[in-house]
Amino acid sequence: MDKSRIPNFYKMPINERLDAVYERGLISKKDYKLLKNQQQQLDINSADKMIENVIGVMGMPIGLGLNFLINDKEYVIPMAVEEPSIVAALSAAAKISRSGGGFKTECTDPILTGQIQVVAIKNLEQARNDLLSRKQEIIDLANSFHPRMVARGGGAIDFSIKTYPMESFEGEMLVLNINVNTQDAMGANLVNGMCEGIAPLIESITEGKVFLRILSNLTDQSIAKGTMRIPLKCLSKEGYDPEQIRDGIIIASDFAKADPYRASTHNKGIMNGIDAVALATGNDWRAIEAGAHAYASRHGRYSSLSEWKKDKNGDLVGTIEIPLKVGIVGAPIESNPAVALNLRIMNLDSATELSGVMAAVGLAQNFSALKALSTDGIQKGHMTLHARNVVKAADAPHEIFDDVLEELLVSGEIKVWKAREIVQNLIKKEPIVTDEFDAVTPGKAILLGEHSVVYGRHAIAVPVPLNIRVKIEDADDGVLLMIPSWGVEYYLDKKPEERQSFEKPAALILEKMNLSNVGMKIEVFSDVPRGMGLGGSAVLAVSIIKALNHHYKMGLSEQEINEMAYESEKIAHGNPSGIDNTIATYGYPLIYRKGEKTLKERLQIKEPLDLVLAFSKSEGLTAKTVAHVRTQWKSNQEMYEGVFDDIDAIVLNGIQAIQENDLKQLGELMNFNQGLLNTLQVSTPELERMIHIARDAGAFGAKLTGGGGGGAMIAVSDNPEEIIEAFDNEGFQSIRFSVQDSG
């Protein structure tokens, strides 16, 4: 089995990708568990020791570059990068390269140069000669600061001397460039320490004054070279002759060699791949970039780092020559668990080997870019991969993801709102088979009364045609929670103090149901978008409880399920009203009031109530807006209690309007409610714009729904299609639905 070749890897769910990597022996069982649990990431306390003023840790996707055969060795290459085209492009290039024997690389010794600047020298020529005559003494002193490096075969090996005129002052400066073999360390601190250590001796010998003493990032003593040969027959592409593709790549290469404007983008493409590997392996990508671009100007004009020609057989041959000084050991590398894991995946023996891998990655990335430019153009491939991110952002369910992607590309509108529209259309076409799941729970919209319901007033909520479905499977060990549309996949941490915020509600549920030590996979399929005010956290909690209740035949009543979900909601929102979990539990239109004896009365809706939900382009955090209102309430309780009383009166009148099917009256009440929500400062300019779009399109009334601060709005109309069209024209995704319940 070719370890670096994993067919259809990009199509696999994340858990199957991990299985494939583990089965090929690319990671140990320990690393497999770390990745499954997502425990390989840098923790905040470690980060605090690495840099100053730490407040958090930013994540980057780690993708695997596949198919690499370098010097007859198989490689799977971890890459930390956010641009979607990079990993796919170089993996495809590496696959093609195998037809010509893969990549061949060679690297010089890992030499890093330190510089000592000396000024105010009385006799420059004498100083130069004196330094050269005492070369061994200087080198021995430098090596005395790092004897263990010397013992491993590294250390200072030589130096050279250059002089330059001073531009701002009279006289000349002398610069001693000392070359150090840093072995498997990147060596920045090591070389800087040597420069500092020998500076007094240099001053003494030259009778001048040492000023700067620091490494250089132009690592032209540490060069990596790589080649790849692609047989002409392997350059075929529909609509293009192989010769046309080959010659197009060569012409593009000549352009980059001749023109600095083109060369800058050409080399940026090379660095796309190299930087991603540098980040994944904990190397200083900024130093690598600086050295590479300086090297590209070594002939007095900025030019390309690679070159493409045809050989005597007519095959395409690419070469790259680039300074690459990297490391695989050292504190910055070893302190980051993700970096250590990535290095283990690569199975490297030395930093020099890593340099060769990076050179191959850079050449592969360069080939893919030039091939795209010489055929369909770069944008087509970019947009295809960009579209995957758009579909992901639209919360497309895993089971229809590829269908949504295909329709989005055909539409030409690579926008989130369009992807959401396609999702809804496909959901309508393919009704959910509820028997396949242990629980199916609808989302909710609050028609009237949000925020005031937290303070013991009435509210009206209705179910919406978006739901969360949960399937439970038995497992050997641990609790794996998977929500593909939300990008969640990890094992719940067994240590309560180490659980992330998202884990805590689910962990509480398991504890309450005495299932904490039972191995299982909880798979969640969600049509309910996060942060849209549709009760996602409550729906998730209720759906998980119902699924566990069904799977393990626990016999919980609806009341018990509701109470347990409410406890979970307290963790998510701090001071919830309970309306979200209640409607999620019972699933019917609801009149609700929180209190010593909570009211949860079924709302009678005899005639279909046509409603439109429209989604803003920003999430609203209910916990944040609820906390904001509470702060304001504490500062002026009398005024805010009056606002809550006014909203309560609107809700009670709204109940009557619904029961009498008076849509116009209901709409006016919704508009009044929105005005009072503005008083509470929970609306946003975007929501206000959406509300006006709905009203201008003929809605009787429109308001935000849920916590606000972003999220969604709801409108009532006797002609909802016109409102849907208005939102489509403005680039907002929306759905229509009807509610009827006569008990």
Image (tube, rainbow, N blue to C red):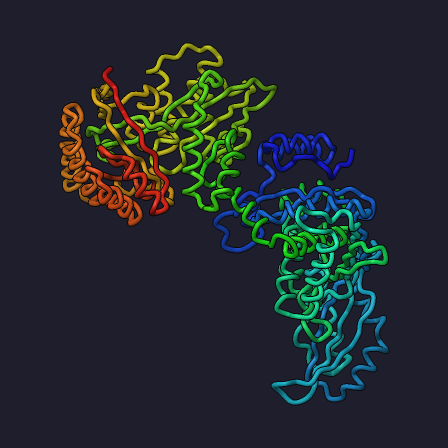
The correct choice, above or below, for 603 with respect to 705 in the image is above
Where on the picture, by quarter, is residue 139? bottom right
* Residue 640 drawn at (x, y percent): 18, 40
600 relative position to 7: left or right: left
Q: Nearer the viewer, residue 743 or 571?
A: 743
* Residue 331 drawn at (x, y percent): 66, 51
The correct choice, above or below, for 217 with respect to 507 in the image is below
* Residue 86 drawn at (x, y percent): 62, 49
Quadrant location of the N terminus? top right
Q: Does the rendering let one see residue 146?
A: no
The correct choice, above or below, for 226 with respect to 121 in the image is above
* Residue 644 drawn at (x, y percent): 17, 36
Q: Nearer the viewer, residue 531 or 158?
A: 531
Q: Does the rendering let one see residue 181?
A: yes
Q: How many marks?
A: 0
The correct choice, above or below, for 492 with respect to 166 in the image is above
Q: Nearer the viewer, residue 400 or 524?
A: 400
695 relative position to 341: left or right: left
Residue positioned 69% across, 70% down in the render = 258
Quadrant location of the C terminus? top left
Residue positioned 31% across, 48% down in the render = 686
Where on the picture, by quarter, is residue 416? top left
